[in-house]
Image (cartoon, rainbow, N blue to C red):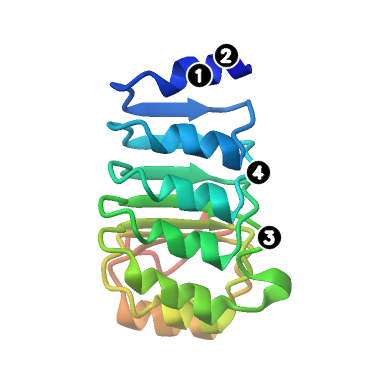
Amino acid sequence: LADDEWEILAGLEGLVTLDLQEGIADDARAVLLSRLPKLERLVLRESPLGDEGLVQLAACHTLRDLNLPRCRCTRAGFEALAELPRLKSLRIGSPGLCPEGKGGAELGAVLLRFPALKSLHLIDVPLGDEGLEALARYDGLWNLYLDGAEVSDAAWERYFTLHPEVHVHVDQAHHDRDPN
């Protein structure tokens, strides 16, 4: 979108769904998006949102579904999203969430602060066994999709012992223990 189109977009107070398959929404554009009073679903496929952009989006309390497969946030930005009271579905990918495979347990623990999350998809986030174990303390998930998570079979066995009902995909395929 061109600058004038972003200004028009910012004035669409009745906008409920925004799906940008192409077009960059950076941290500055997130400010405009956060002001949309009825926005429930946001998909930004090619947007390099960092922590500041996610902090801005966290002000959009109507968001229910958020899809950011290629952002550039860290755990701090992820934590800001826990402020979204209605967020049920989060799909996010960023190399900064678990840089060099570290911090998975801390990232998984952040999930405990999300009040309404039912579906989580982490894309190329090396959560590891400790991250999945921390994430297992969250009882609200219906769906869990992990791509590039680097989780062992033993950790998955422990997860399914605690959550046999959760629909699980690992690296774009159903886990063989998936109940669905």
Q: Position of residue 117 (x, y in %)?
A: 31, 58
In the picture of the structure, the residue carrying the numbered disc 4 is: 48
Q: Secondary structure at mark 3?
A: loop
Q: Earlier in the sequence, mark 4 or mark 3?
A: 4
Q: CA distance from mark 4 to mark 1?
A: 19 Å
Instruction: Relative to 5, say whether 150 is above or below.
Output: below
Contact between labelled residues 1 and 2, with CB atoms less than 8 Å apart:
yes
In the picture of the structure, the residue carrying the numbered disc 3 is: 95
Q: Residue furthest right?
A: 100
Left of 72 or right of it: where is 40? Answer: left
**Quadrant in the rendering for residue 12:** top left
Contact between labelled residues 2 and 3, with CB atoms less than 8 Å apart:
no
Please rate how many residues cluster around mark 1, counting C-alpha atoms within 10 Å: few if below 14, some from 14 to 19, many from 20. few
Please rate how many residues cluster around mark 4, counting C-alpha atoms within 10 Å: few if below 14, some from 14 to 19, many from 20. some
Of tags 3 and 1, the one toward the viewer is 1
- Circle 2: residue type: Asp
Q: Earlier in the sequence, mark 4 or mark 1?
A: 1
Determine which of the numbered discs, if any, sits on residue 137 in the image. none
- Circle 4: residue type: Pro
Q: CA distance from mark 2 to mark 1?
A: 5 Å
Q: In the picture, which quadrant includes the N terminus? A: top right
Contact between labelled residues 4 and 2, with CB atoms less than 8 Å apart:
no
Q: Secondary structure at mark 2?
A: helix
In the picture of the structure, the residue carrying the numbered disc 2 is: 4
Q: Is residue 54 visible?
A: yes
Q: CA distance from mark 2 to mark 4?
A: 20 Å
- Circle 1: residue type: Glu
Q: CA distance from mark 3 to mark 2?
A: 31 Å
Instruction: Relative to 142, say whether 66 is above or below.
Output: above
Q: Earlier in the sequence, mark 2 or mark 4?
A: 2
Q: 133 and 13: which one is in front?
A: 13
Q: Secondary structure at mark 1?
A: helix
